[in-house]
């Protein structure tokens, strides 16, 4: 991640310059607060890298990079409400620190801010960039509602799950790269290949997220290990387990979902998943999406030397332990 | 309103053609449902009229007109949640018919749809139209949070109240007209004058809304007369009364806010307002904003014959009894 550090720092310093009016406080204070909570800033870095690949300086594309990050933060504010999450990055979420009305409206203001940042672009490029953000933004909403729907659905398949994470997470990574390439006037084919790279890396990233929930090192992991198990989330681990389990094992999984002793619930679930080699299966799937991503990146018609930072980012996303 | 009927019908028929993907149902069914609930469709009609004033056919500007109406509906879905309103236009609100998570996300999808509709415009006009929608959209969020803030503030003045309704309601009417004029390539000065006309008519319209809450004919009025009084809303009527009341009368108003017998509460408040000639004061203010609007419309440099439909719309907005 060392070669990414200057990019993260650049994003942080530029994000700090995004201005909101002083008043009304209850609309803009939550946004000033939330954008300072930090994070990996993967998406805007992807936009910078997507432009640099084709020789366009990061300064040229910074506004679009910030637009993508601000859009992502808008989705987080509303998702935190939906998930009733009290904390994010060890700080209070907006609806927790203020209230739900403020979280709705400041989230709304933030998506508009994302559009405003996008618009600081060469006017001839605006229609295409605008269309890409619109399409992506709707897909992210679709992914989020699918995720919510899954909670009460009994027929969630692995295919549906992958489609959900593609929409909820991955299309924005694809779009982040593509907007960078678009501003850099890359060919349509290179733009498409980069988009596919981002999308597949996004799926691999999300699978790693699911794996880490149960298999992270508790000393390094920022949140509770087994959180998804406790919340009975239909993650890829769970769906893979269900697919491989005997009738008897399925019954155990079902019973564990109603288990009140949470430590026992997590440990017993993990034991069962280990028996079923669930982690290994998920890692294979992750590797498959990683390979697809790399194939798309290979096809981008520039010197492979220039792709190095992007490859490092991709490796970090699937190998990270936090 | 007779001359406006063809416009309303045109908007309804075009709005019915706005398409959403079939799935996910929980994202798009609420939008199909909500856009069919009807309404006065004042905003998109203003966009059509704003273009026609300068000789541009309504068909040319329909997508921008729909964008404005769809944006307005997005704000309604989220506002209904914030206001905990179970009904709108005698039908269930989205959060009531589905749930709050669905109302958040389908509202989010709808604002994106508004941007998508806006983008169907001559590419050279997109940057200006986009900037106008962004600015207006943020202002509407500011107005909405001010409205929410007022509930717990004791120092709300008439000036602050007018600023709140300007942001929450009026800027969108101004923008609706301006986008029409912009597509029709009207001069900057004409665009500004039309915007000011829309904004001032919007304020007059909202004052009429406040007056109707207490003084509407119950047989014609679609909702409960005195709803704002029951909810202790700081409307212009209330703020005017507070400004004119003696210490003793203020104490009565304060006591009435805690009154449980709602019929008595409404009637006694009305009696007091009548003594203070509150309605007449508000009507004078409304007339003042109406006059300002007309002055701006006068200044638009086209034949006054062509302004007739817009004048009719303005008259309807301030004279309506429902």
Image (cartoon, coloured by chain):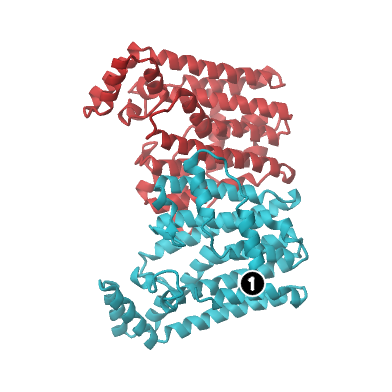
Chain colours: A red, B cyan
Identified at 69% across, 55% down, the residue is B128
Left or right placement of residue A44 versus residue B217 in this view:
right
Q: Is residue A221 above or below residue B154?
A: above
Answer with left or right where residue B270 lies relative to residue B291: left
Vertical side of B51 occupied by A275: above or below: above
User: Can the viewer see residue A33 in this picture?
Assistant: no
Front-lying residue, A91 or B212: B212
- Which residue is label 1 attached to? B197
User: Which structural element holds mark 1?
Assistant: helix
Given residues A37 and B217, the one toward you in this image is B217
What residue do we see at 71% from left, 33% from top? A184
| Above or below, A224 relative to B133 | above
> How far across and down, in percent of the image, does residue A57 sit?
68, 34
Please tell me which residue is depicted at 37% across the width and 51% down the height of the picture.
A98
* Residue A317 percent location from the top left of the image: 50, 23
Residue A151 percent location from the top left of the image? 38, 34
């Amino acid at each position: 991640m060392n070669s990414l550090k200057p990019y993260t720092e650049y994003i942080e310093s530029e994000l700090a310059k995004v201005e909101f009016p002083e008043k009304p406080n209850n609309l803009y204070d939550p946004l000033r607060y939330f954008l300072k909570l930090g994070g990996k800033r993967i998406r805007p870095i992807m936009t910078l890298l997507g432009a640099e690949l084709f020789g366009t300086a990061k300064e040229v594309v910074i506004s679009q990079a910030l637009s993508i990050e601000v859009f992502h933060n808008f989705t987080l504010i509303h998702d935190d409400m939906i998930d009733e999450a009290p904390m994010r990055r060890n700080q209070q979420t907006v609806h927790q620190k203020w209230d739900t009305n403020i979280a709705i409206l400041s989230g709304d203001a933030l998506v508009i801010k994302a559009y405003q940042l996008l618009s600081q672009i060469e006017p001839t490029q605006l229609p295409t960039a605008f269309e890409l953000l619109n399409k992506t933004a709707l897909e992210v909403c679709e992914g989020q509602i699918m995720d919510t729907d899954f909670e009460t659905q009994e027929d969630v398949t692995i295919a549906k799950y992958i489609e959900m994470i593609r929409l909820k997470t991955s299309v924005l990574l694809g779009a982040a790269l593509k907007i960078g390439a678009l501003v850099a006037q890359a060919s349509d084919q290179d733009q498409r290949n980069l988009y596919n790279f981002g999308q597949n890396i996004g799926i691999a990233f999300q699978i790693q997220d699911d794996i880490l929930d149960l298999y992270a090192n508790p000393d390094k992991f920022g949140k509770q290990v087994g959180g998804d198990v406790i919340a009975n989330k239909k993650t890829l681990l769970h769906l893979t387990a269900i697919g491989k389990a005997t009738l008897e094992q399925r019954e155990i999984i079902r019973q564990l979902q109603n288990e009140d002793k949470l430590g026992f619930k997590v440990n017993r679930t993990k034991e069962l998943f280990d028996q079923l080699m669930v982690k290994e299966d998920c890692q294979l799937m992750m590797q498959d999406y990683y390979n697809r991503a790399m194939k798309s990146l290979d096809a981008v018609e520039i010197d492979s030397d220039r792709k190095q930072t992007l490859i490092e980012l991709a490796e970090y996303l699937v190998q990270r332990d936090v």
